[in-house]
Image (spheres, rainbow, N blue to C red):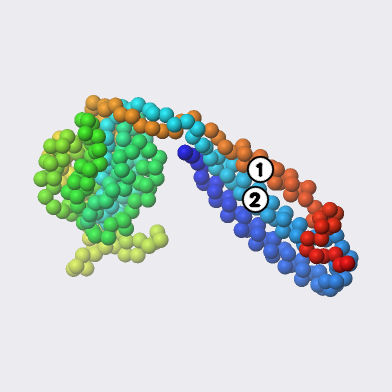
Amino acid sequence: MYQLEASIYFYLLAAIPVVVLLFLLVTVWKRRTQKRFADAPLLKKLSPNKSTFKPVLKVLVVCLALACLSFALVNPKIGTKLETVKREGVDVVFALDVSKSMLAEDIAPNRLEKSKQLITQIINSLAGDRIGIIGYAGSAFPQVPITTDFSSAKLFLTGMNTDMVSSQGTAINEAIQLAQTFYNDEEQTNRVLFIISDGEDHEGNVREITEEAASQGIRIFTIGVGTIEGGPIPIKQDGTLQYYKRDENNQQVITRLGEATLQEIAAEADGEYIDGANTKEVVETVTAILNGMEKKEFEAKQFTDFKDQFQWFLAGALFLLVFDVLLLERKTAWLKKLNLFNERKE
């Protein structure tokens, strides 16, 4: 098992093709300039020890040094010990609405991004709990199964968007049904489902599904994201506004927070409705809810004692840079004697 401490430094690898391109441009410029003063046979006589291979080798060494330096800055860590860790917590599943109405910007930066911020902050506040993530619009789909790997969960959460489901709508009932399959521990007495949505355009008989979930010990808490006044739904391409969504009568669609729907769902499943406008208040409310529940002890295997590996790559980069400095561009005597490129005529 490995970890990457600062993967952003992989962007340094982009310097390698730049170095190669500059080398090729300089080589072409040198050859054109030399042709103005003398032809190739005469230049070979004037500088018999000039090597055509050494400059290429020097550039290759510099590129390898840059690659090693990039990995050193990223600092990969390798887990050296697998341990079984005992935890106490609750199984928490997040169902995130990814319908087009979540693009409304009545709450900054928009409803979907605000929802992802809320989930991220809630995950950051958790300790020994297990989490899972579901996405839904016209249908529901599993995004992250029940896991203790919070980092991976947040990574998958970041990539969720409104294009993940082709059919539009808000199938909350499907999300609740799918959530029931996430709780794989029959002994877990406390099962929690957080539905993060604007509560608009829900489909199906939610009450029946909610009652079924409640009978399985699943408490449903809803978090409303948006405003009562609402706002239009912007359709963007590459971050640029193209138009606002319109209905069949060519009227601009205004989407509003459906608090009544979310409050009804929470009430049916022994839960609570939470206003998602203030991130800090949401996190505090969720933390208080989870702390008040009985924790289930479970075992999880994980790698511990991760060791830094940057020193190997740093040493390699320093060695290659020193080697590049000591590597001269003229022909080496012993290499010349080998006549690898048939340069010496008998």
> For the point 55% across and 35% down, which residue is it?
308
The answer to the question of whether label 1 and label 2 lie on touching residues, with beta carbons closer than 8 A, is yes
Amino acid at the residue labelled 2: Leu
Residue 15 placement, left or right of 258:
right
The quadrant the C terminus occupies is: bottom right
Please give the label number shown on residue 157: none
What distance separates the C-alpha of mark 1 from that of mark 2?
A: 9 Å
> For the point 82% across and 65% down, which residue is it?
343
Q: Position of residue 141 (x, y in %)?
A: 27, 51
Badge 2 crowding class, 10 Å Cα cut-off, few under 14, some 14 to 19, many 20 or more, is some
Residue 8 placement, left or right of 254:
right
Helix, strand or loop at mark 2: helix
Q: Position of residue 172 (x, y in %)?
A: 19, 49
Residue 224 seen in this snapshot: no
Q: Nearer the viewer, residue 273 or 39?
A: 39
Q: Nearer the viewer, residue 104 or 147?
A: 147
Above or below, 307 against 18 in this view is above
Above or below, 126 against 197 in this view is above
Give the labeled residue for mark 1.
316
Q: Nearer the viewer, residue 149 or 158?
A: 149
Helix, strand or loop at mark 1: helix
> For the point 58% across and 42% down, which residue is it?
73
Residue 226 placement, left or right of 304:
left
Badge 1 crowding class, 10 Å Cα cut-off, few under 14, some 14 to 19, many 20 or more, is some
Q: State how many labels appear.
A: 2
Q: Nearer the viewer, residue 346 or 137?
A: 346
Q: Quadrant of residue 137?
A: bottom left
Q: N-terminal of the two: label 1 or label 2?
A: 2
Give the labeled residue for mark 2.
64
> For the point 65% across and 62% down, which residue is it?
21
Residue 112 seen in this snapshot: yes
Amino acid at the residue labelled 1: Gly
